[in-house]
Amino acid sequence: MRPVSPHPLKPRTLRRLAVAAALCLGLGPAVAAPVLDREFADPDVVKVGGTYHAYATNGDGKNVQHATSRDLKRWRPDSGDVLPVLGGWAAPRRDLVWAPEVYDSGDGFTLYYTAHDRASDRQCIGVARSASPNGPFRPVGDGPLVCPAAEGGAIDASTYTEGGQRYLLWKNDGNCCGTDTWLHLQPVSWDGTRTTGDPVRLIRQDPAGDGGVVEAPTLVKRAGRYVLFYSAGDYSGDQYRTGYALAPALTGPYTKAAEPLMTTESLSGAVRGPGGQDVVTGPDGRDRILFHGWRDDPRRRVMYAADLEFANGHPVVRGA
């Protein structure tokens, strides 16, 4: 018979204890540093050799922006467009090319991107390939890879790999048309050019706590638990924020934390609307979280970075 605690702790209490433990460890308050002071929303970062490559939503006249760094602090923007041509299924609308994701498949590089599907009139996820992380990436396939039109389409691709299996995470864009938004996990081929199984729903929006929207999934595994980071709320406002959910198994069940990881308030107002995050291992072997935020103009979301620690199994952001 399993012993039962006479005074079980509520999730909010556990979260506060985790933060308190982090402060005792000297992690300090969350203070993020801008590392690329230009429009660079929804950053995705992949390390190739000793170089970090970051990709971002359209901007500066490009479908997909690209920058490189050796230390995650000093970044050099690329003058070219790493995705100069969209798939034939996509409307030629650069302003609707969002949230790229790139990974090394061993025999080249795969890029996922969101664009506007002509047939369904929805935002959907396409795939492109390149021999180099510098591009140019060329579209693959005659149509989008993921496009559940009845659920609003699909956006915000990211990837996770475990046990030799590649997975694609994505959001159905239900907030475009008054339906639920879910974060999904779906198996794909190793090069990512085709799906190999049905999607599994992980979490959906909470109208109160999430502002009606969850998006931008990022999945990692730490200390035997799965940590699903996500963004919530309206990206153009102060209430956009980064949350997370924990699970004992890859497909869940995932339990949302009682309090978000990053908000405008938790970052002391120095960064407004933190979201679109990615987690990467720094040169020192420690976790870093990169994300976008803004100060005076929500149309200019710059890239920030901060250290990411785990206290009592919960992620905690500390100063860069």
Image: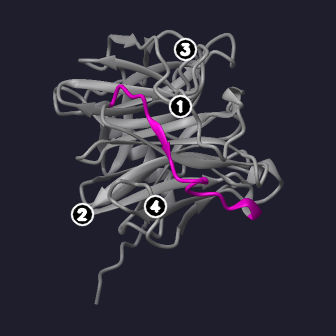
- Residue 164 tag number: 2
Q: In the shown orientation, is residue 155 left or right of residue 136?
A: right
Place of residue 207 in the rendered image (x, y in percent of width and height, measured from the top left): 74, 53
Whether pointer 4 and pointer 3 mark residues with C-beta atoms closer than 8 Å, the reply is no
Whether pointer 4 and pointer 1 mark residues with C-beta atoms closer than 8 Å, the reply is no
Q: CA distance from mark 4 to mark 3?
A: 41 Å
Q: First in sequence: mark 2 or mark 4?
A: 2
Whether pointer 2 and pointer 3 mark residues with C-beta atoms closer than 8 Å, the reply is no
Q: First in sequence: mark 2 or mark 1?
A: 1
**Mark 3 crowd level (few <14, some 14–19, many ≥20, 10 Å Cα):** some
- Residue 211 tag number: none
Q: What amino acid type is highlighted by mark number 4? A: Arg
Residue at left offset 67%, top offset 42%: 90
Residue located beneath label 1 in the image: 42
Q: In the shown orientation, is residue 138 left or right of residue 48?
A: right
Q: What amino acid type is highlighted by mark number 1? A: Asp
Q: CA distance from mark 2 to mark 1?
A: 27 Å
Q: What amino acid type is highlighted by mark number 2? A: Gly
Element assignment for label 1: loop
Q: First in sequence: mark 4 or mark 3?
A: 4
Place of residue 236 in the rendered image (x, y in percent of width and height, measured from the top left): 71, 27
Q: First in sequence: mark 1 or mark 3?
A: 1
* Magenta-tinted stretch: 133-150
Q: CA distance from mark 1 to mark 3?
A: 18 Å
Q: CA distance from mark 4 to mark 1?
A: 23 Å
Residue 144 is a magenta residue: yes
Name the image quarter holding residue 93. top right
Viewer-proximal residue among 134 and 278: 134
